[in-house]
Amino acid sequence: MKQGIPAQIQLFKFANKGLVFSQKYQVSDFPRISDLASNSNGLVEVELNFGLENKKIPCIKGQIKLDLSLICQRCLDGVMVHLEPDFNLAFLQNEQQGENLDDSFETILNADEEFSTIEFLTDEILICVPMIPLHQHKCGSYKNPKVALEKPENPFAILKKLKN
């Protein structure tokens, strides 16, 4: 049974019970992401599956789907970027626990039993945001094409006039 995600993830409790959570958020619910994106009312779909690996290692398998309106770094206009980060995380108390884990898990050394859902999801989303968002098509440059055709003035031309 799917249910809304609590504000705090109780890692061991949720993993022991094998809980599955699903919820829809808005981009504005994630302060660090809404600082980057201009579509603060955009939809963020989240699904989290908790479980135990090797009967003692808490794991979270998750999927997030969202569209962010970012600034194209080529033309400085808005560009819509679709993100679907999937993650399979194993939370280890020490490095030895990870030796017998399947390679599909990304391991995280974590001693915290409880942590913020929003901060956790924010980190997973930010990992997938492109460093340099660009349009898929060849968008125009931010430079004015008329200015690019003009021949630049020589900065030493004034000295030539003073010499005469």
Image (cartoon, helix red, strand yellow):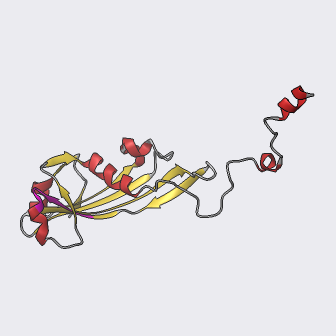
> Residue 135 placed where, x, y %?
59, 59
Q: Nearer the viewer, residue 131 or 59?
A: 131
Q: Is residue 125 left or right of residue 37?
A: left
At 30% from the left and 52% from the top, the residue drawn is: 121
Q: Is residue 58 above or below residue 158?
A: below
Asked if the magenta segment contains residue 160, the reply would be no
Q: Is residue 160 above or below residue 152?
A: above
Q: Nearer the viewer, residue 149 or 86?
A: 149
Quadrant where the image shows the N terminus: bottom left
Q: Is residue 120 left or right of residue 95?
A: right
At 52% from the left and 55% from the top, the residue drawn is: 133
Asked if residue 17 shows in the view, the reply is no
Q: Nearer the viewer, residue 4 or 151?
A: 151
Q: Is residue 104 left or right of residue 25?
A: left
Quadrant where the image shows the C terminus: top right
**First to last magenta residue range:** 88-95
Quadrant of the rendered image containing residue 98: bottom left
- By secondary structure, the bulk of the magenta-drawn segment is best described as strand
At 32% from the left and 58% from the top, the residue drawn is: 46
> Residue 7 placed where, x, y %?
23, 46
> Residue 16 placed where, x, y %?
9, 61
Asked if residue 136 shows in the view, the reply is yes
Q: Nearer the viewer, residue 44 or 150?
A: 150
Residue at the extreme top: 162
Residue at the extreme left: 55
Asked if the magenta segment contains residue 93, the reply would be yes
Give the total number of marks visible in the rendering.
Answer: 0
Q: Is residue 158 above or below residue 108?
A: above
